[in-house]
Image: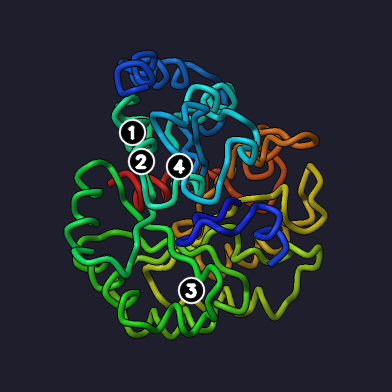
């Protein structure tokens, strides 16, 4: 549940509370086809699953420098490359992954873009841009050409209204509608009502709510917060990521305490607008595993039909991030 902050000053702890292309990419080239072939051979009721949210980074800070004020000591784990991510994902039948720009790099999306190029067909991307910078449309279109299908948006240190209702965010949402690029919102529950207003203003813009809008991050899942999230279902282009189980509710596998919230979202949005995601590498911190995350959806929620699981584990993310 990392925060790709526009000023790169929000630590992961604060968030939870409120190569060269030749050297670095040489091991990647041609890997995507192999990964796809191997995962398609695996047994399981859902094959070719998509992880709709994961982060990658490299210890090669010379080739890919960190944004201020981050230092290599703050990178935990010190390395989480695409190959390391796939080592967790592939044994669980995950064939494709949506990479979310890591806050360590600020607005420099190069490492994520190089990963997309290095693993053809495996990764899609959600980038971070400076909405205040000139040439925003050109920047977003250039990133789209390189495999980006969404943009992470978040209030950072601003009040929600100041962030969301300003001219820069309006421009982003308009470009998103024009180009079918999703706004991927990392927000707390208090932002849900303002986002409802934004959806009314921009009905043609895709909105993806990350991590249940962090409902339950303090250990308490409140009905009123779920009500506000479910209310967004009236906007047909809103989807929700069922993700970051390690950080919500009881914060312990098998995470079945999140089942009632998932069921309410299923009733409100339908399976076609819900997507599972791991939020790795944070999902694979000690005490948690990648398999624990996917198995909540794949095995443990009896109210999910086989068709529901196919949407949550593949088809929704396919439509939003791989089309």
Residue under label 1, please give it.
116
Tell which tag, 2 or 4, sits nearer the viewer: 2
The crowding category of the residue bearing disc 4, from other C-alpha atoms within 10 Å (few below 14, some 14 to 19, many at least 20), is many
The disc placed on residue 124 is 2
Q: How many discs appear?
A: 4
Mark nearer the N terminus (2 vs 3): 2
Tell which tag, 2 or 3, sits nearer the viewer: 2
Gap in Å between the C-alphas at discs 1 and 4? 18 Å
Mark nearer the N terminus (3 vs 1): 1
Q: Is residue 243 left or right of residue 142?
A: right
- Which residue: 48% across, 64% down? 185
The answer to whether residue 294 shows anywhere in this view is no
- Which residue: 68% across, 67% down? 18
- Which is nearer the eye, 188 or 205? 188
Mark 2 near mark 4, Cβ–Cβ under 8 Å?
no
Determine whether the residue tagged by mark 1 lies in a helix, strand or loop.
helix
Mark nearer the N terminus (2 vs 1): 1
Mark nearer the N terminus (1 vs 4): 1
The answer to whether residue 85 shows anywhere in this view is yes
Residue under label 3, please give it.
233
- Which is nearer the eye, 314 or 114? 114
The crowding category of the residue bearing disc 1, from other C-alpha atoms within 10 Å (few below 14, some 14 to 19, many at least 20), is many
* Residue 260 percent location from the top left of the image: 73, 62
Gap in Å between the C-alphas at discs 2 and 1? 6 Å
- Which residue: 58% across, 51% down? 2
* Residue 216 percent location from the top left of the image: 73, 64
Mark 2 near mark 1, Cβ–Cβ under 8 Å?
yes
The disc placed on residue 314 is 4
């Amino acid at each position: 549940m990392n925060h790709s902050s526009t000023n790169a000053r929000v630590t992961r702890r604060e968030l939870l509370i409120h190569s060269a292309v030749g050297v670095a990419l040489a091991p990647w080239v041609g890997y995507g086809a192999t990964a796809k072939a191997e995962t398609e051979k695996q047994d399981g009721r859902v094959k070719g699953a998509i992880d709709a949210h994961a982060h990658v980074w490299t210890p090669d800070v010379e080739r890919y420098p960190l944004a201020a004020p981050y230092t290599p000591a703050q990178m935990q784990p010190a390395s989480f490359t695409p190959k390391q991510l796939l080592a967790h994902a592939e044994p669980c039948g995950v064939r494709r992954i949506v990479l979310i720009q890591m806050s360590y790099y600020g607005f420099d999306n190069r490492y994520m873009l190089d990963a997309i190029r290095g693993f053809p067909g495996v990764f899609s991307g959600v980038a971070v841009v400076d909405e205040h910078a000139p040439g925003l449309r050109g920047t977003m279109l250039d990133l789209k050409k390189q495999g980006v299908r969404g943009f992470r948006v978040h209030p950072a240190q601003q009040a929600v209204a100041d962030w969301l209702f300003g001219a820069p965010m309006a421009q982003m949402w308009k470009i998103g509608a024009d180009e079918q690029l999703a706004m991927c919102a990392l927000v707390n529950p208090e932002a849900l009502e303002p986002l409802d207003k934004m959806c009314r203003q921009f009905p043609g813009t895709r909105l993806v709510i990350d991590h249940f809008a962090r409902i339950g991050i303090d250990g308490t899942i409140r009905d009123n917060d779920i009500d506000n999230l479910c209310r967004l279902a009236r906007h047909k282009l809103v989807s929700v990521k069922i993700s970051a189980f390690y950080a919500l509710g009881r914060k312990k596998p098998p995470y079945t305490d999140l089942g009632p919230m998932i069921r309410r979202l299923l009733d409100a949005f339908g399976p076609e607008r819900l997507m599972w995601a791991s939020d790795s590498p944070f999902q694979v911190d000690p005490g948690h595993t990648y398999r624990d995350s996917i198995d909540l959806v794949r095995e443990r929620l009896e109210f999910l039909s086989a068709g529901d699981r196919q949407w949550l584990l593949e088809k929704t993310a396919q439509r939003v991030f791989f089309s």
